[in-house]
Amino acid sequence: MSDFEDQARAALAAKDDTQRELAAAATYPQWRHAIFGLLMGGLMLAPALPSAGRIAMFAALLCAMLLIMRSDRRRSGMFLNGYRRGKTLTLPSSFLRLK
């Protein structure tokens, strides 16, 4: 084997190790998932509230999200927001048909 192949194998092994470390750090406790679900529910509820309630709900949700971000960064050193650049997955047309 050439030196180039050895370097390539070492680089791939280092990449795999880094991916394993990131995956281990990105495990979240169940309470975080529950709170995040409540936040999403609050976002769905907010438009049904009167304007003062809507503003208060959005302010509370924003504060809660900032607390979750701070907790994640303290616990694991990172916050995964779920944003994905580019096109998202498309749904097949058979899935979109109403029956």
Image (cartoon, rainbow, N blue to C red):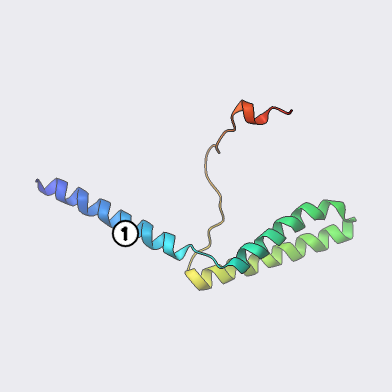
Q: Specify the quadrant of the image occupied by residue 69.
A: bottom right
* Image coordinates for residue 4, horizontal then vertical, percent: 14, 46
Quadrant for the C terminus, please: top right
- 53 horizontally vs 12: left or right: right
* In the image, farthest residue toward the right: 50
Q: Residue at x 81, y 55 (%)?
A: 46
Q: Quick check: 54 left or right of 66?
A: right
Number of numbered discs: 1
Q: Residue 34 in the image: x percent, y percent?
A: 66, 64
Identify the element where label 1 is drawn: helix
Identify which residue is drawn at 28% across, 57% down: 14
Instruction: Tell me if residue 8 comes above or below residue 67 in the rendering.
Output: above
Name the residue rendered at 52%, 43% in the picture: 85
Q: In the image, residue 62 lies at what x, y percent?
A: 70, 62
Q: Is 62 placed above or below 71 here?
A: above
Crowd around label 1: few <14 · some 14–19 · many ≥20 (10 Å): few
- Indicate the quadrant where residue 72 lies: bottom right
Residue 74 location (% of width, % of height): 52, 73
Q: Amino acid at mark 1?
A: Asp
Q: Which residue is mark 1?
A: 17
Residue lying farthest to the left in this orientation: 1
Depth check: give the residue in front, 59 or 15: 15
Question: Considering only vertical position in the picture, is 65 above or below 74?
Answer: above
Would you identify the image quadrant in which residue 92 lies? top right
Residue that extends furthest to the front in the rendered view of this protein:
99
Towards the viewer: 27 or 12? 27
- At x 64%, y 31%, the residue is 95
